[in-house]
Amino acid sequence: MSYQKMAAEIVTAVGGKENVVELSHCATRLRFVLKDTATPQDQQVDKIVGVKGISRTSGQYQIIIGTEVPEVYAEINQLLGDIQPTNQTDQPKEGLFNRFLGIISGSITPMIPALTGAGLLKAFLALFVNLKWINATSDTYVMLNFVADAAFYFMPIIVAYGAAKKFKTNQVLAMVVAATLIHPTFTALVSEGNSFTFLGLPVTLVSYGSTIIPALLSTWLMSYVERISDRIIPNFLKYFLKPLVVIAVTATITLLVLAPLGNLIGNVVAGLIDGLNAYGSWIVPTVIGGLFPLLVMTGMHWSLAPFWLGSIAQTGSETLLGPGSLASNIAQGAASLVVAIKTKDPEQKSIASSAGFTALLGITEPAMFGVTIKQKSILFSVMAGGLVGGAYAGFSGLVRYSAGGAGIALLPVFVGENPMNLIHALITMLIAFVTTFIITYVWGFKPEQQPAAPQSYGKVTIDAPVKGETIDLSSVKDQVFSQKMMGDGFAIIPSEGSVVSPVDGKVAMLFDTKHAIGIACDNGLEILIHVGIDTVNLNGEMFKALVKQGDSVKKGQPLLTFDLAGIKAAGYDPTTMVVFTSPVKEVSPISLGAKNTTEAVLSVEV
């Protein structure tokens, strides 16, 4: 897989650098915040080799890649360069709940690697103690244990870092305000338990170590305090007064109002969970095991993160998400492996087998978006297996001791003070796997009717779509094209401002800016005609489309016109690229030099 080519195709598909406001990634997904979410065509993005699926949730355009996401993210970052954040987007305003999910996921995603590493360290320490490899009173254990605890104890500071980025406010100031919640003086006051006031107002003395919601609320408030300070403080005083006002005002209101409110919210939710567990310990893991795929697809699993993370940090274990998600993740793997066994489609077999093993290890997005949601019956099989496995987890009292996901590779997070907990985790996995495998094999997977093989024309002759001088792609002054990241092809230095179709086919894609158009031939060949370099910045000016997306076109039929002189006068290079974005067997040598629109440039074997 070429990460460069994949990155270039993704950037083009989401509307180019100009449409990207923000980009981040988690373990398996690229998470875009776009100016115009209507620009990406999901079907077009889904066809990119290496893309496992698409999800529009929490105000983000998410592209599921799988475990290769860091490499793809790095290549996209190189193409995007420095993205200038902006609050101006063309997308509809999100609902309150979706905004809440977006804030939670955006704030917590950056801290997941730290919590995973610290959680696994604690899990291995517990395992080594149970195996008698280390003594819990030894200096070595004590040191490694407080190293692991640090990520959880200082959670308010860590979550403030991610929240500040989400709220577009100063990250260092947000971390300073969050640090006041766990300052040694404040924690000493909490321990003493004496009344404490600020200007006569009572200060609630609560331990905020290992909490999330108070830091989220303080950072939210700080984003407004900072903006107001920006407006009212004279420029020549901002360097000194702005941080003073932001820290003093935000920290004071946080300690007096927001932190106690956040603590109250956490206690209420924890009380509800404890009440459900007291009524029936099987209820929560069973529900989560059955509904977890729907929670992930809608992003609602993020709404539970502050509470299960808080439970681990404060009590040493949690039952809210870990036991049920373990059953669901294994069910995803089982269903995908059934598809891999039964399908006759080689491509689907390859995707399902890879995604199945990845899901068993604990990363389910490739299986979910690439396999199991393709058919409702497969999804229902996964939910049934997760429900049954989750029920056993609940009845057995399974708990998760550390953050870090749920799967075979992350079994250490279920190792703790109760040696039987790991046994219950293994039985939960076995029940979920067997149940899902049987249901999917017998009922869930229905092999899709294989489409007839597309008619092959052998070699397809490609005419010049623009009158001008044909040149090699390597001569183009844009590395995306010159290094053939998008695919092979050729380029033309135009002498006229008219583009015609170089082949018979259908208009598969027409950018809103009219500077690029995609043609799909009946035999599967896909061609991108891109007029000019960086001409997307013209926002459609100087371009006129003569066809619309979905139109059938004949070779030589006019597609669009452009103001060649105007583009040059605006300082843009009008070189027009013709690129084959679908796989081809062979491309003949290019016929270089002057060409009319009726002249052949090369031939392609599909």
Image (cartoon, grey):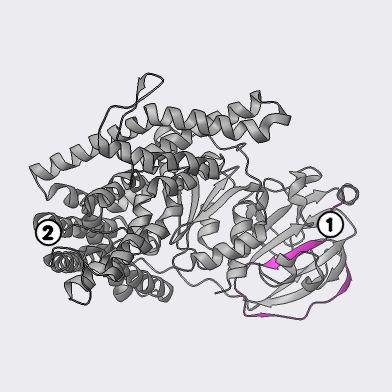
| Residue 409 vs residue 442, the one in the foreground | 409
Picture disc at residue 392: 2
**Res 541 quadrant in image:** top right
Location of the N terminus by quadrant is bottom right
Give the side of residue 486 with respect to residue 328, left or right.
right
- Disc 2 is placed on an element classified as helix
Task: Establish if 151 lies above or below 225.
Answer: below
What's drawn in magenta, residue-wise?
571-595
Residue 520 lies within the magenta run: no
Residue at point 37% right, 57% down? 115
Residue 445 in sight in this render: no
What kind of residue is marked 1? Pro
Residue 572 lies within the magenta run: yes
Task: Establish if 129 lies above or below 146.
Answer: below
Residues packed near mark 2 inside 10 Å, few (<14), some (14 to 19) or many (20 plus): many
Q: Position of residue 567 (x, y in %)?
A: 86, 49
Q: Nearer the viewer, mark 2 or mark 1?
A: 2
Give the side of residue 132 with respect to residue 114, left or right.
left
Query: Is most of the magenta stretch helix, strand or loop?
Result: loop
Q: Position of residue 462 (x, y in %)?
A: 74, 70
Residue at point 84% right, 53% down? 572
Picture disc at residue 436: none
| Residue 334 vs residue 323, the one in the foreground | 323
Task: Establish if 85 lies above or below 359.
Answer: above
Q: Position of residue 151 (x, y in %)?
A: 38, 55
Residue 129 in sight in this render: yes
Residue that carries the numbered disc 1 in the rendered image: 574
Task: Establish if 523 lies above or below 85.
Answer: below
| Residue 398 vs residue 157, the one in the foreground | 157
Residues packed near mark 1 inside 10 Å, few (<14), some (14 to 19) or many (20 plus): many
What kind of residue is marked 2? Tyr
- Disc 1 is placed on an element classified as loop
